[in-house]
Amino acid sequence: MGADRVGPVAAAFRERTGRDPEGVWAAPGRVNLIGEHTDYNDGFVLPAAIDRLVLVAAGRRAGGRLRLWSLQAEPPADLELAGIGPGTVGGWAAYPAGVAWALGQAGVELGGADLVVDGDVPAGSGLSSSAALECATATALADLGGADLDRADLAGLARRAENEVVGVPSGVMDQMVSMLGRAGHALFLDTRSLGAEQVPLPLEAAGLCLVVIDTRAGHRLVDGAYADRRAACQAAAAVLGVPALRDATPALLERYATALGDPGLRRARHVVTENARVLAAVELLRAGDLDRLGPLLAASHASLRDDYEVSSPELDTAVEAAVAAGAVGARMTGAGFGGSAIALVETALAGRVADRARDAFAAAGFGPPQVTAVVPSDGARRLA
Ligand code: GLA
């Protein structure tokens, strides 16, 4: 999806509002190569924006109301801007409405707007359709409001919308990469300093591709398991006497093993070892050794499965099938509890990985996975 979708979403805007949109903006979903459940521990992440987008056709409108339509979700919403705040909007509209609220909190005067949303980031797949929706909306509304905010500011406001209006206590990884992603690159982000480095990910030149295996076993972040993990990490940091698990070391964990207990020690160990794996992965990418990422991806998945306990039978099956079919490496991506796995695969083997995954799902009695290749792509932008 991309430029070819501008016409249809603009037409849908005209149909609903009786006028032309002032522009069309877009923001991508993401995969995370490595660095899972580290972003709310002030740690390191290495995601990439992908070629799946949420598009927003938008125009200003007097009268202080925000009208929202989605070509994928129901129902539309017609909200009084001044009345939007934490706990006031439910369903899909909470994401764009939350962004309008966060922009208002940052002093951006909107006056009123109409938005029509279209997209091909599958919802509930762990590919950050919510961050894509937030960031496309933030880019659109910031432009329309004449706001002087940079991309990291907008990512912060999008995250604020998710945390405070949608009510999911996510970290900032998804919004940052949806705003800052660059084609052919992964984003190495220090979530404490927000220092970001574009690390080349020349998949095509290396004869590799990035395959997403969407288990179709929907994940629900609002369910509480995500918040539980977050709380466990905060509790562990308090036991260790550090501001965040980012500051912990393997030696410190060993020293406080009894006080941390189980599962506290395992939760903390995942974060500490995962941060180290991100740094090691960045070193490999800087050296152009993409084909040596396999062991880090495998260790990340095992840690998420055994120590952090956020994998699922479907995700484990997807990862095992991809590796058995000859993938360089594979792991679950995103929050887990369902969602998608990624596999780094020699392009010639991509078909085999897809077949193996489908066969393994059928043999295990799971519904068929959706297998697609994704391409590291640019972040949020104005399309028209
Ligand atoms: C979700 C959250 C992110 C991050 C990941 C897990 O995608 O939105 O902030 O915590 O889970 O790495």
Image (cartoon, rainbow, N blue to C red):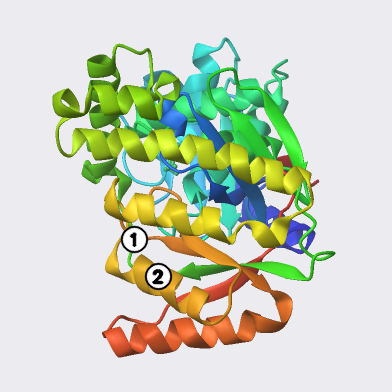
User: Which percent across, then down, holds residue 208?
Assistant: 73, 69
Query: Would residue 260 be found to the left or right of residue 181 on screen?
Result: left
Q: Nearer the viewer, residue 44 or 67?
A: 44
Q: Taking 217 as reference, is 96 above or below it? A: above
For residue 215, which numbered disc appears in the image? 2
Residue pictured at 60% horizontal, 37% vertical? 279
Horizontal side of residue 158 vs 287, given as left or right: left
Q: Is residue 58 visible?
A: no
- Relative to residue 176, is residue 90 drawn left or right? left
Q: Residue at the spot x=72%, y=82% of the render? A: 348
28 vs 97, nearest the viewer = 28
Q: Which residue does the numbered mark 1 point to in the structure image?
A: 338
User: Which image quarter: residue 177?
Assistant: top right
Relative depth, front residue between 94 and 156? 156
Locate residue 180, reporting x and y percent. 70, 35
| Contact flag, marks 1 and 2 (Cβ < 8 Å) | yes
